[in-house]
Amino acid sequence: MAPSQLRAAIYVRVSTLDQNCDNQLLELRRYVTARGWSAEEHIDHGISGSKARRPALDTLIRDAKRRRFDVLVCWRLDRLGRNLKHLISLLDDLQALGVAFVSLAEGIDATTPAGKLQMHILGAIAEFERERIRERVQAGLQRARAQGVKLGRPRRRIDFAGLSEVAGLPTREAARRLGVPRSTLQRALAQKAGFLAP
C-alpha cells in the first residue's frame, strides 16, 4: 500500500473532564490530511494515563489486531503510554501487527527509515532498563541469601489439634475452614498418619 493510501488511527487523550481534545485533534487532523491519509479517531476523554484500561485505547488495539488501520498517530508519547515500559510494549505489539507509529511532538514517524531507527533506539533503551532492573533484583536476592534470609512464602503449619475440628469434611472445605491451601492440609494429614516425617 502506498504511503498516500494509508489508513490512520488518531489517538487522543485528556486526563480530566474539564480539559478538551480540540488542540490535539486540530493538529492531528491537519497532519493526516497533509499526508493524504484517511483517518478514524479514538478519544479517551477524562481518563488518566495511569489507567490500565482505557475504552478508546482498547478499541484501537482491537482494530489494530483486525488490520483496520496502517499507522497510529498521536500528539505526544505521554498521551499513549502509562510509562516507558507500557509504551514500548504497546509499540512492539503494533509493530508486530505491521502498524507504523507517528508522534507529532517528538517528531517520530515510523513510516520513514529514520523514524524506524528512532523506534529501535527507544526499544533498546527500554530493554536496557529492563536488564538493569533484573540485575538489581538478582543482586538483592543474592545479598539476602548471603545474609541467611529465607526467601519465598513461609510454609504454613497446622496444629494437629486443629485437624480434629475438621475431621470428616471434604479436603477443600476443611482447608477453607482452617484458612490454608489444600496442599498444606494434605501434607499435615500425611504427617499425622505417619506417611511423612514431621
Image (cartoon, rainbow, N blue to C red):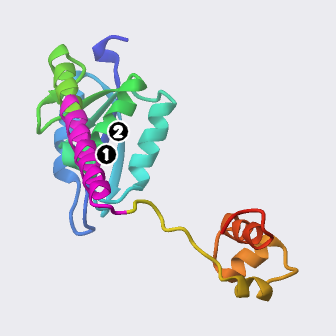
Q: Residue at x 72, y 88 (%)?
A: 161
Q: Residue at x 34, y 31 (%)?
A: 92
Q: Secondary structure at mark 2?
A: helix
Q: Is residue 192 left or right of residue 106?
A: right
Q: Nearer the viewer, residue 122 or 137?
A: 137
Label 1: few (<14), some (14–19) or many (≥20) C-alpha neighbours in 10 Å:
some
- Which amino acid type corresponds to the residue marked 1 in the rendered image? His
Judge whether 34 appears above or below 73 on screen: above
> Is residue 89 visible from the viewing direction of this image?
yes
Front-most of residues 26 and 152: 152
Between residue 29 and residue 164, name the one nearer to us. 164
Pointer 2 with pointer 1, Cβ within 8 A: yes
Please provide the residue range marked out in magenta. Answer: 124-149
How far apart marks 2 and 1 lie (CA) works out to 6 Å
Q: Which mark is residue 90?
A: 2
For residue 88, above or below residue 16:
above
Residue 119 x, y percent position in the rendering: 21, 27
Question: With 154 as the anchor, is 23 left or right in this view?
Answer: left
For numbered disc 1, what is the local secondary structure?
helix
Give percent across and percent down for residue 125. 18, 34
Q: Amino acid at mark 2?
A: Leu
Instruction: Find out whether residue 140 is within the magenta segment.
Output: yes
